[in-house]
Amino acid sequence: MKKLILPLLAVLILGSCGMESMTDTQPNQNLENNLLLKNGFIAQEESSSLTDLNSARVQVTDQYTILGTMSEGLATGFILNESVPAVITASGEVGFYFAGLGDPATPNGRPDVGSSNGFPVVSLVARVGGGDLQFVGTGPTQLTGTGEVVFYVNDSFFGDNSGSWNIQIAYECYPGPGYWKTHSELGPAQYDKTWALLSNGASTSFYLSGSTWLQVFNTAPARNAYYQLAHHFMAAKLNVLSGANPSAVSAELNTAEALLNTYTPAQVGALSMKSPVRTQMLTLASNLDNYNNSLSSPVSCN
């Protein structure tokens, strides 16, 4: 579908730009196309249908098994983001000397035998994004940092190890614009009470737009950077209200709010393709979209 849409969008853009050259329109074109697709919108000139591309916020548990003999550790592919806490628990037994599973270690290790790297020997530890080792144990444990989680058996000799530990990572997937626009008190999907945290729910006035939050959500961007920013701003704000950590995008949210309090959709729609304000709005929209996408693990949410 993307392969069909993107070329057509490019033709539409060039046709609407008059005498502007390909060089004039190229810098923001790919960014804009991606935002349109991720919003669930196809440009108005092509289609007016709106597609809900996002699923509801749900509790997810990813499961892994690390063998006692894995000297290089277990790379999970799970990308930890501090905006969304992930709780780790583990169980099982690893044998670590001639007695094997006759005298095993749980993920908490064997402090009675000794320590290694500052933690009980033969305990479950992890690195996040190549950072320092962190103790995991049986949990529940919350790791710190951002990046891929790699688990290790905290041992220095693996030739006589046996057994394995089962690891669970539990977290929530947060939704994007497609979810929020369909889960207000006005339906059509099941009501998400996060909307009630706005002053007038989905009918709350959205800055200088002359429309409500829900009306703005349901307005196709049609190349207007105001609506592209508004959709990802609203999704981020609602995700924060529902419990997501806003620290990664506090500056972006504040800047976006200031712009939305300064310009109307008509004013932004009249800006040239090369306008600094338009470029700033598209960049903020992309950053907020990335934030909304980061509120989930690429393993199970996306």
Image: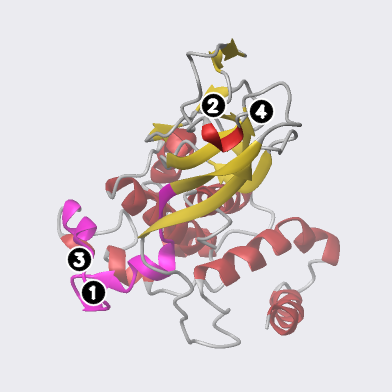
Determine crowd level at label 2: few under 14, some 14-19, many 20+ residues with C-alpha closer than 10 A. Answer: many
- Kindly report the distance in space between the C-alpha atoms of the residues bearing marks 4 and 2: 18 Å
50 on left or right of 193? right
Residue 277 seen by the camera: no
Task: Say which of marks 1 and 4 sits in front.
Answer: 4
Q: Label 4 near label 1: C-beta < 8 Å? A: no
Tag 3: amino acid: Ser
**Residue at x 84%, y 60% (from the top left corner):** 23
Q: Is-magenta flag for residue 232?
A: no
Q: Percent from the top left, x then y, of residue 74?
A: 67, 42
Residue position for label 4: 98
Q: Which mark is residue 190?
A: 1
- Kindly report the distance in space between the C-alpha atoms of the residues bearing marks 1 and 3: 17 Å
Classify 157 as above or below 149: above
**Residue at x 69%, y 78% (from the top left corner):** 2
Tag 1: amino acid: Gln
The residue lying toward the viewer, choosing from 283 and 180, is: 180
Q: Label 1 near label 2: C-beta < 8 Å? A: no
- The secondary structure type at the circle numbered 2 is loop
The residue lying toward the viewer, choosing from 78 and 252, is: 78
Residue position for label 2: 123
Task: Say which of marks 3 and 2 sits in front.
Answer: 2
- Kindly report the distance in space between the C-alpha atoms of the residues bearing marks 3 and 4: 69 Å
Question: Is the N terminus in the top left, top right, bottom left or bottom right quadrant?
Answer: bottom right
Q: Percent from the top left, x then y, of residue 185?
A: 18, 70
Tag 2: amino acid: Ser
Sequence-first tag of 4 and 2: 4
Classify 79 as above or below 36: above
Q: Which mark is residue 203?
A: 3
